[in-house]
Image (cartoon, rainbow, N blue to C red):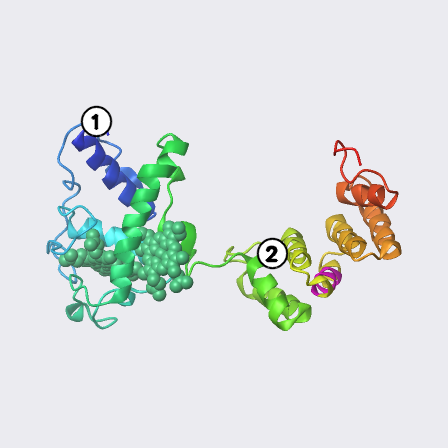
Amino acid sequence: MMRSRVASLALAAGLLFSMCGVPAIAQTPTPPGGPGPQGQGPQPGPGGPGGMNQKPKNLKVLPQDMSREQVTAIMRGFTGALGVRCTHCHVGQEGSPQSMDYAADDKDEKLTAREMLKMVRTINTDYVRMASGGDAKADVRCETCHRGRTEPPQPLADILVETASTQGADAAIAKYTQMRSESLEAGQYDFRERTLVGAARRLQEQNASDEAVALLKASIELFPNSADVVASLGMVLLQRGDRGGAQAQFNRALQLDPKNAMAQQGLRRLQGGPAAPGGPPP
Ligand code: HEC
Ligand code: HEC
């Protein structure tokens, strides 16, 4: 690395701030490559509950000279990103500042969070910034994965495939409906019809064709105007050898959207034409 040590320190501090959702204002006034020892930001205000002017004494990843105030700002980012309180990672009693021992490393969650900090820093310095041209707004942050939960949410299609293969398509649709009513606003899952179509396609690939058909039929009720859902059902029926059923679904999809590519392709296949335009000659 050709970068000067001061510049990399500045970059590291900037990364640590940005990854926690804390605006990087503390860094911007410093000219690029400019000097100035790190951690000389705004001095902590007087005391405050929990002793704001007490210097952190057990920082192993964050810069050791960070003030208590700077560390606390990052910590608030952690609680928001994971949807937890300080006591999730630190020993002590919720609501009793005197009982908190922030320096102690007793909790596994704190140790995991430390590894996560290192991971996020590596992702950003070694990979993301290569692609983003150093744009801090593109950096990965705790929130990027965690979305307000201790366990980052799985893709919805994974959940639906898992539920459909173990408990059947009805259970998968029930799960979808329940999750949509509970967490639509949190924005953690993609509830659009493409997720249902993707899950059905994967079930079909896993030879769970009955579940794929049942999932798509239920999806049509949820998205009655989606040509893609109807055409996908046609494709699954075609693969099962139900040519009549497939043709009916392709026609229905074209009524909803005369330009629907999947339905057009399905009809071409039914007529014995090439599977895809430009494909190899039979
Ligand atoms: C997700 C886990 C997590 C949560 C939640 C969390 N912290 Fe931390 N905290 C850490 C980790 C990890 C460190 C050590 C960082 C390092 O080693 O560089 C730390 C260090 C600290 C320190 C420095 C202690 C010292 O003396 O070295 C303070 C102060 C602190 N946290 C306060 C808080 C406060 C206040 C909250 C709630 C607003 C909070 N933390 C929430 C993980 C967490
Ligand atoms: C690239 C995705 C990703 C990023 C970014 C990420 N995490 Fe995680 N984190 C995970 C995964 C995956 C798990 C394991 C969850 C599980 O147990 O299923 C996890 C687990 C954890 C846990 C333990 C779970 C628990 O019960 O408390 C903590 C604490 C944690 N992460 C903190 C953080 C913090 C703090 C950051 C930001 C510095 C962060 N993570 C950034 C993916 C990520």
| CB of mark 1 near ligand 1 (< 8 Å) | no
Q: Which mark is residue 33?
A: 1
Q: Is residue 35 above or below residue 272?
A: above
User: Residue 213: within the magenta?
Assistant: yes
Question: Which image quadrant is residue 178 in?
Answer: bottom right
- The x, y position of residue 62, in whole percent, is 20, 48
- Magenta region: 211-217
Which residue occupies 68% across, 70% down? 170
Q: Which mark is residue 191?
A: 2
Question: Which image quadrant is residue 122 in?
Answer: top left
Q: Nearer the viewer, residue 104 or 76?
A: 104
Left or right: where does residue 112 sit relative to residue 216?
A: left
Count of residue discs:
2
- The x, y position of residue 74, in whole percent, is 27, 51
Q: Earlier in the sequence, mark 2 or mark 1?
A: 1
Q: Is residue 153 above or below residue 271?
A: below
User: Where does the N terminus fall, quadrant-wise?
Assistant: top left
Judged from the image, the secondary structure of the residue bearing numbered disc 2 is loop
Mark 2–mark 1 Cα distance, whole angstroms, equals 45 Å
Which residue occupies 17% across, 43% down? 42
Left or right: where does residue 245 sit relative to residue 46?
A: right
Q: Which mark is residue 212?
A: none
